[in-house]
Image: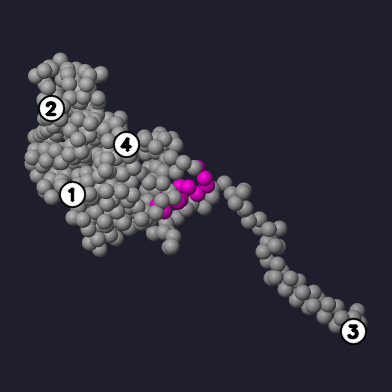
Amino acid sequence: MSRKTRTITALCLILCMLFTGCTKDKNKATEQPTETPTPTAELSPTPTPEPESEVEHMTLKDRYKDVFKVGVALNNTTLKNKDYMDIVKEQFNSFTFENEMKPDSLLNKTATQKGYPDTNTEPVLQFISIQNGLSIAQQNGFGVRGHTLCWYSQTPRWFFTVDYSDSGELCDRETMIARLESYIKQVMEFCQTEYPGVVYAWDVVNEAVDPGSGDANGIRREKNNWYATIGPDFIDYAFAFARKYSDGTAKLYYNDYNCYDKMSTIIKALKSVQEAGNIDGIGMQCHFGTMDSMRDRAYKAAKYFTSNGYCVQITELDIGSKTRAEGIEKLQAIRYKELFYYVEQGVKAGEINLDSITVWGLYDDASWRTGENPLLYKRAVGKLEKKPAWYGAMQDPAIEIPQN
Ligand code: GLA
C-alpha cells in the first residue's frame, strides 16, 4: 500500500468511527432494544408496586384520638363476625346499632298485647337485640350512640292504637304521652343500669323536621303517628322525658338528614326544647353523594349549629355514587378526605363543637344504599379490604383536595 493510500484509509477509518459513535449516542434509546431488550409493561410479569401509603399502618381511631371519636354502624351479624369485629376494634372507638335499638326491635308486641289493659301506659320491652352489642362495647371500651328513642319510622303502628291492636284506632294524646314516657324511661334505665357509661349520646328524636310537607313550622306530619296522637309538641315531651331519666352520662341529640338544607327550620323547631335546657346537640346524618361539596354540606351546617349553641355529631356518614364510572373510587376518596379535613380544621379552630363522626356501616355490601358502594371497606376474597375511601378518611397526603 502506498503512503497516500494508507493515509486515505486511516482518514476513512477515523471518520467512520466518529460517525458511528455520534449516531450511536444520538439513537441510544432506539438502538438499545436490539442489544439488551427492555421488558415492556405488557411483558412484565410483576408490575411495579405502588409505594406504600404513609397512613397504611395507622388507624382511624388513633388518627383522630385528640379530636373526635370515629364510629361505625353495626348490625348483629357483623357484631358476631370475629374477622369483621377485629377490624372494628382496631379502627373504631364508637358504634351505633343499625336497627337493633329502634322501637321496632325493643317493643315486645306479644307481652304488651297480652298484658293489656295493665300495659296501657306501660308497654313491655325486650332488650335481647342489644345485650350482646352492649357487652362488647363495655368490654372493649367502645362508646355507643343510642339510636333512636322517638321516630316516626321503624316504630310499629300497634304501639299507637287504643288496645295495641294492629288495626285499632289511634289512642288519645294523654295515653300516648304516657307511653312515650314509659318507653324512654325503660330504654334509658336499662342501658344506664346494666351498662353504665356505655351510651354517650342519645338520638332522642329522629327526623321530625320536613320543611316541604310539614306543618307551618316544618314539623313532619306525613305518616307520623307521634304527630297524629300527641301533636307537634311530641318533640318537647320526648326531650323532657330523656332529660328526666338521664343519669347525665350521655348527651341528648336531635338527629336528621339533609341538615344543610333545613338548618334554620331545625333551629326553630328545637327552640322551646333548647330553652327548657333539654337538648345538647344536633346529629347530622350526612348521607352524601360523590358530587356533593363536603364544605357546603357538612362543615357549614356544623358551624351554623355550633354558633346556635349546639354540640354536633356526624351520625350516619356515607358517600355513594349511582354510577360506576372509571375513577369513581378516587373521587369518593377525595370527598372523604374533604369531609374529615374540613371538620377537623373546624374543630381545631374552635368553629365547630363536634366530638364524634360515625360511618353508616362497615363495608359496601352491608350498606342500605345498595349498589352505591358508599363505605370505607369492601368485601374481597375471604376478607374485607380498605378502599381508597379509607385513605381519604385518614387524610392520606397522597390524595389531593382540588382547590376551587
Ligand atoms: C335513617 C335512620 C337510620 C337508617 C337510615 C337508613 O337515616 O336514621 O337509622 O335507618 O335511615 O338505613
- Which residue is painted at 11% across and 21% down in the image? 119
- For disc 4, the neighbor class at 10 Å (few under 14, some 14 to 19, many from 20) is some
- For disc 1, the neighbor class at 10 Å (few under 14, some 14 to 19, many from 20) is some
Question: For the residue labelled by badge 4, is the local secondary structure a helix, a strand or a loop?
Answer: helix
Per the model, the C-alpha gap separating discs 2 and 1 is 25 Å
Q: Position of residue 395 (x, y in %)?
A: 36, 55
**Magenta residues, as a range?**
324-335
Per the model, the C-alpha gap separating discs 4 and 2 is 43 Å
Per the model, the C-alpha gap separating discs 1 and 4 is 42 Å
Sequence-earlier tag: 3 or 4: 3
Question: For the residue labelled by badge 2, is the local secondary structure a helix, a strand or a loop?
Answer: helix
Sequence-earlier tag: 3 or 1: 3
Closer to the eye: label 4 or 2: 2
Q: Position of residue 308 (x, y in %)?
A: 21, 56
Q: Is residue 301 visible?
A: yes
Q: Is residue 25 above or below residue 330?
A: below
Q: What's under tag 4, amino acid-wise?
A: Tyr
